[in-house]
Amino acid sequence: MHGRVPAVSPEELPEQLPEGSLLDVREQEEWDAGHAPGAVHIPMSEIPQRLDEIPEVDQLYVICRSGGRSSKVTAYLNASGWDAVNVERGMNGWSSIGRPVVADDPEAEPYVL
């Protein structure tokens, strides 16, 4: 299974994720447009420098826009000692099944960028 990372579809995720268990690795402008409630935001490019900010949870779910970046981060984190799982189809899949998307700006209509 060389090159494969553990993955889960948005449909398979628990309805209520434990606090800190969803890591969003998209860029700041993508996060600002809309993100999952309660997600932790650390852009992919900042992961190596910010490992100490990654929550210590039993299962860490990693999400991006479509699943590509989060797959790479999942592999990196698992090689570094975490128990991480890639969220397939990313925020596109998350929002397409009706999971909530929020924006930090209360005036903005959240969307997946």
Image: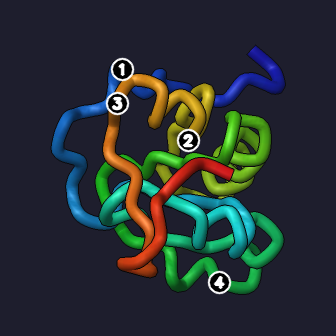
The residue labelled by disc 1 is: 11
The location of residue 71, given as percent across then percent down, is 71, 39
First in sequence, mark 2 or 3: give its number.
2
| Of labels 4 and 3, the one closer to you | 3
The residue labelled by disc 4 is: 50
The location of residue 45, given as percent across then percent down, is 82, 71
What residue is rendered at 64% in x and 56% in y?
77
- Marks 4 and 3, how far apart at CA: 31 Å
- 46 in relation to 10, above or below: below
| Of labels 4 and 2, the one closer to you | 2
Q: Is residue 110 left or right of residue 6?
A: left
Contact (CB < 8 A) between labels 1 and 2? Answer: no
| Of labels 1 and 4, the one closer to you | 1
First in sequence, mark 1 or 3: give its number.
1
Task: Count neighbours of disc 2 (C-alpha within 10 A) and say few if under 14, some if 14 to 19, many if 20 or more.
Answer: many
Q: Amino acid at mark 3?
A: Gly
Please give the label number shown on residue 91.
2
Where, quadrant-wise, is the N terminus in this rendering? top right
Task: Count neighbours of disc 4 (C-alpha within 10 A) and say few if under 14, some if 14 to 19, many if 20 or more.
Answer: few
The residue labelled by disc 3 is: 98
Instruction: Label 4, secondary structure: give it.
Output: helix
Instruction: Label 2, secondary structure: give it.
Output: helix
Q: Nearer the viewer, residue 98 or 88?
A: 98
What residue is rendered at 60% in x and 48% in y?
112
Q: Amino acid at mark 1?
A: Glu
